[in-house]
């Protein structure tokens, strides 16, 4: 039933994870489809490969900002 709702009215995405300031992961509140922003800012289906890339990017982003905040 929820997938039918999304087919008729479209997905209603909510941010599920902030990877960096520009890259976020989203999840549909009705059918739980997961997407992420790609390099050009468009939404792409969250594949295991993109999930791994986002996890690595998040680790690098957090490490960089942790050291920047400690120096300042």
Image (cartoon, grey):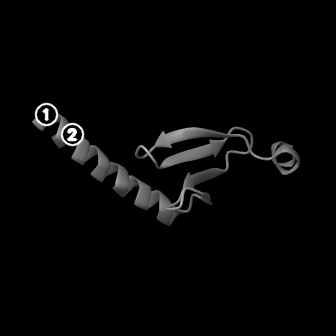
Indicate left or right for 41 with 72 as reference. right
Residue 72's mark?
1
**Image quadrant of residue 28?**
top right
Q: Considering depth in this image, is 68 or 27 the residue closer to the camera?
A: 68
Residue 15's mark?
none
**Image quadrant of residue 26?**
top right
Q: Is residue 66 above or below residue 39?
A: above
Q: Which residue is mark 2?
A: 66
Indicate left or right for 5 with 56 as reference. right
- Element on which disc 1 rests: loop
State which quarter of the image contains the C terminus.
top left
Categorize mark 2 by other alpha carbons within 10 Å: few (<14), some (14-19), many (20+).
Answer: few
**Image quadrant of residue 21?**
top left
Indicate left or right for 58 with 39 as reference. left
First along the sequence among labels 1 and 2:
2
Marks 1, 2: nearer the viewer: 1
State which quarter of the image contains the N terminus.
top right
Q: Are marks 1 and 2 in contact (CB under 8 Å)?
A: no
User: Which residue occupies 67% across, 45% down?
Assistant: 32
- The residue sitting at the bottom extreme is 49
User: Which residue occupies 11% across, 37% down?
Assistant: 71
User: Which residue occupies 48% across, 57% down?
Assistant: 51
Query: How far apart, in angstroms, are the residues tagged by discs 1 and 2?
Result: 10 Å
Please tell me how many numbered marks the rendered image carries: 2
Q: Position of residue 48 (x, y in %)?
A: 51, 62
- Element on which disc 2 rests: helix
User: Which residue occupies 47% across, 49% down?
Assistant: 23
Q: Position of residue 12 (x, y in %)?
A: 72, 40
């Amino acid at each position: 039933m929820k997938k039918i709702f999304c087919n008729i009215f479209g997905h209603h995405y909510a941010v599920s994870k902030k990877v960096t300031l520009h890259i976020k992961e989203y999840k549909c509140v009705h059918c739980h489809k997961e997407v992420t922003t790609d390099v050009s800012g468009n939404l792409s289906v969250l594949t295991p490969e993109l999930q791994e890339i986002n996890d690595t990017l998040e680790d690098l982003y957090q490490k960089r900002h942790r050291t920047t905040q400690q120096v300042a």
